[in-house]
Image (tube, rainbow, N blue to C red):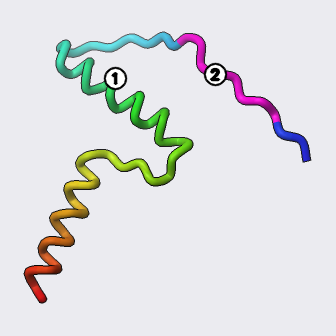
Amino acid sequence: MTYKKRNNISEVSFTYVGTDAQFNEFLKMMIHDYLAVDNPYAMKETEAVEIAEEDQKRQQAM
């Protein structure tokens, strides 16, 4: 079986309309998603918080 070599991204172009803060958050999400493709254990911060809250509720119920 032959594997094709993946090319690294050399350039990205897009148009964004929003505030600087929104743009920064957008870039963080884009980079996170790009890096998470090769790391199945990567979670967004909100997902980690939700899991922690669910675990805390389960422990309190015991």
Identified at 36% across, 49% down, the residue is: 43
Label 1 neighbour load within 10 Å: few <14, some 14-19, many 20+: few
Residue linked to disc 1 = 27
Q: Is residue 17 above or below residue 52?
A: above
Look at label 1 and name its amino acid.
Answer: Leu
Note whether 13 is above or below 2 in the view shown.
Answer: above
Specify which label sits upstream in the sequence, 1 or 2: 2
Mark closer to the observer (1, 2): 2
Q: Is residue 57 left or right of residue 52?
A: left
Choose top left, top right, bottom left or bottom right for residue 3: top right
Which residue shows up at 43% across the image and 37% down it?
33
Disc 1 to disc 2, C-alpha distance: 18 Å
**Residue 8: within the magenta?**
yes
Classify 3 as above or below 10.
Answer: below
Say which residue appears at 14% left-offset and 80% top-offset: 59
Looking at the picture, tell me which residue is in the foreground, 14 or 25. Answer: 25
Q: Amino acid at mark 2?
A: Asn
Helix, strand or loop at label 2? It is: loop
The reply, left or right, for residue 11 in relation to residue 22 is right
Disc assigned to residue 50: none
Residue 9 lies, in percent from the top left, at 59, 19
In percent of the image, x 20 and y 55: which residue is there? 49
The x and y percentages for residue 6 are 71, 29
* Region of the chain picked out in magenta, as a range: 4-11
Using the rendered view, name the quadrant where residue 57 is placed. Answer: bottom left
Left or right of 21 in this view: 33: right
Can you give x and y, in whole percent of width and height, for residue 15 in the image?
38, 11
Up-down: is 3 above or below 15? Answer: below
Residue 8 is labelled as: 2
**Quarter of the image where one finds residue 61:** bottom left
Q: Is label 1 in a helix, a strand or a loop? A: helix
